[in-house]
Image (cartoon, helix red, strand yellow):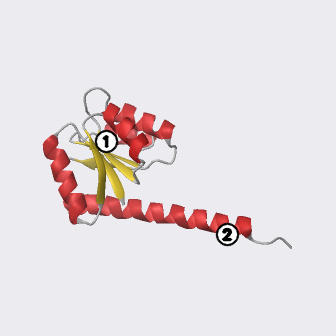
Amino acid sequence: MNILIVDDSDTRLAQLRKILTDIGQDVAGIAHNGAEAVERYGALRPDAVIMDLIMPRMNGLDALRAILRIDPGAIVVMASSMRSPESALECQRNGARFYLHKPFEPAVVRSVVEKLARELNGRAGSAARAGAQEKAPSD
């Protein structure tokens, strides 16, 4: 899976990149703020995005909304050191699939990535089935 990672902290970006590569995932790119995230998403079209909530220029929630306007099917995971259930709920209400707490725990990141991979595989299977039904001869 190709994943765009977004955080204004180089330390957190390095930590997340290491976790993702250690579990066999590809980092499609990085961004340091929400505005860069939206731009990079449009250019790279990654399979998923893991994005910090609190960033300069454009926060993660605004970037989430902008990415979903570009691609309503985008898979975005929000991350924050804020342990507020309200923040997590707000992100999910706006289309985030999951909410990760920082500092990142490798086992939790692995679990979320595995769920995202199953979702992507389910989409691919549904698209293949739909294509086969369209090509099936009619009686």
Q: Residue furthest top?
A: 57
State the separation of the CA atoms marked 1 and 2: 43 Å
User: Residue type at mark 2?
Assistant: Ala
Residue under the image location 67 percent in, 69 percent down: 132
Residue under the image location 53 percent in, 61 percent down: 123
Q: Position of residue 23 (x, y in %)?
A: 25, 66
User: Can residue 103 be seen in this snapshot?
Assistant: no
**118 relative to 56, above or below:** below
Q: Nearer the viewer, residue 137 or 119?
A: 137
Q: Which residue is mark 1?
A: 85
Q: Position of residue 107 (x, y in %)?
A: 23, 63
Instruction: Say which quadrant the N terminus sits in.
Output: bottom left
Instruction: Say which quadrant the C terminus sits in.
Output: bottom right
Q: Position of residue 103 (x, y in %)?
A: 17, 49
Say whether residue 128 is left or right of residue 133: left
Q: Residue furthest front?
A: 43
Element type at mark 1: helix
User: Residue type at mark 1?
Assistant: Pro
User: Can residue 83 be seen in this snapshot?
Assistant: yes
Q: Which residue is mark 2?
A: 132
Q: Position of residue 18 (x, y in %)?
A: 18, 57
> How many numbered discs sit on the rendered protein?
2
Say whether residue 122 is left or right of residue 11: right
Element type at mark 2: helix
Say whether residue 5 is left or right of residue 127: left
Residue under the image location 49 percent in, 38 percent down: 70
Dot 1 surroundings within 10 Å: few (below 14), some, or many (20 or more)? few
- Name the image quarter holding residue 129: bottom right
